[in-house]
Amino acid sequence: MSEISERYRTVAGTFTDVAIAVPADAWDNAAPCEGWVARDVVRHLVEWIPAFLESGASIDLPKGPSVEEDPVGAWTVLSDGVQAVLDDPQIATSEFNHERAGRHTIEDAIAMFFMNDVLIHTWDLARATGGNETLDAQEVHRMLSGVEPYDEMLRTSGQYGPRVAVPDAADEQTKLIAFMGRQP
């Protein structure tokens, strides 16, 4: 297994744990992402990553149940499909070529574009549903270090809200959540 495969297993496993723990009556709770409910957090991940991998690498991930019927099942099928891609060295190291995301190996594209999204949305889902908000400290550090230099560019992309002010002494997870425009 590659380092990226193992990192994804950890990050996605935490999201899975949070999703499994969501009480049945909490899927329509408001999420930290404006206009979203908890179910929408899963929907976002389940909808964009298959299209992204299809367009950049002609990978057709397995289809799960709808997010409306079974959000945990929809996520699990997607995540297991992504993990299978990462666990196959021949596929994982194949070329990914996307008009906006550029050229990478498939595993690097998943690490750069999908893994960070899963990490942040784990917190969103946990916050919306009263779950465990603790994220993997190494991944938090890696992501925070990677995004801070691109603050202005990320803000102008329209995909991130304004950075929330937190004390300099705040822990890295709090800083990352605030950087992403969420109220820690």
Image (cartoon, rainbow, N blue to C red):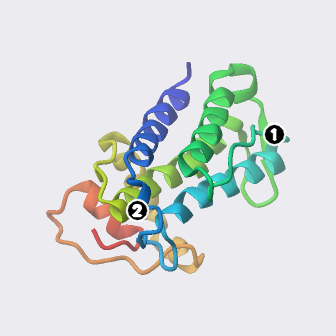
Q: Would you say 6 lies left or right of 165 here?
A: right
Could you tell me residue 144's position as x and y percent? 38, 55
Res 74 label: none
Q: Nearer the viewer, mark 2 or mark 1?
A: 2
Residue 108's place in the image compared with 94, above or below, is below
List the single residue furthest toward the left: 169
Figure quadrant of residue 91: top right
Q: Residue at x 30, y 53 (%)?
A: 133
Q: Within the image, what quadrant is residue 99 found in? A: bottom right
Task: From the top left corner, tell me how far across and down residue 124 is, in percent.
Answer: 41, 62
Horizontal arrangement in the rendering, residue 31 relative to residue 135 (left or right): right
Dot 2 amino acid type:
Ala
Position of the C terminus by quadrant: bottom left
From this view, report whether residue 146 is shown above or below residue 136.
Answer: below
Image position of 67 (left or right of 3): right
**Quick check: 41 above or below 96?**
below
Looking at the picture, tell me which residue is in the foreground, 56 or 148. Answer: 56
Horizontal placement of 42 versus 97: left or right?
left
Dot 1 surroundings within 10 Å: few (below 14), some, or many (20 or more)? few
Query: Distance from label 2 to label 1 (Cα)?
Result: 31 Å
Identify the residue shown where x is 74% and y is 42%.
63
Q: Quadrant of residue 159?
A: bottom right
Q: Secondary structure at mark 1?
A: loop
Asked whether the beta carbons under mark 2 and mark 1 sit within 8 Å of each other, the answer is no
Q: Is 124 above or below relative to 92?
A: below
The residue that label 1 is drawn on is: 60
For the point 37% across and 68% down, the residue is 179
* Residue at x 52%, y 79% (from the top left corner): 35
Q: Amino acid at mark 1?
A: Asp
Q: Quickly name the residue at label 2.
A: 26
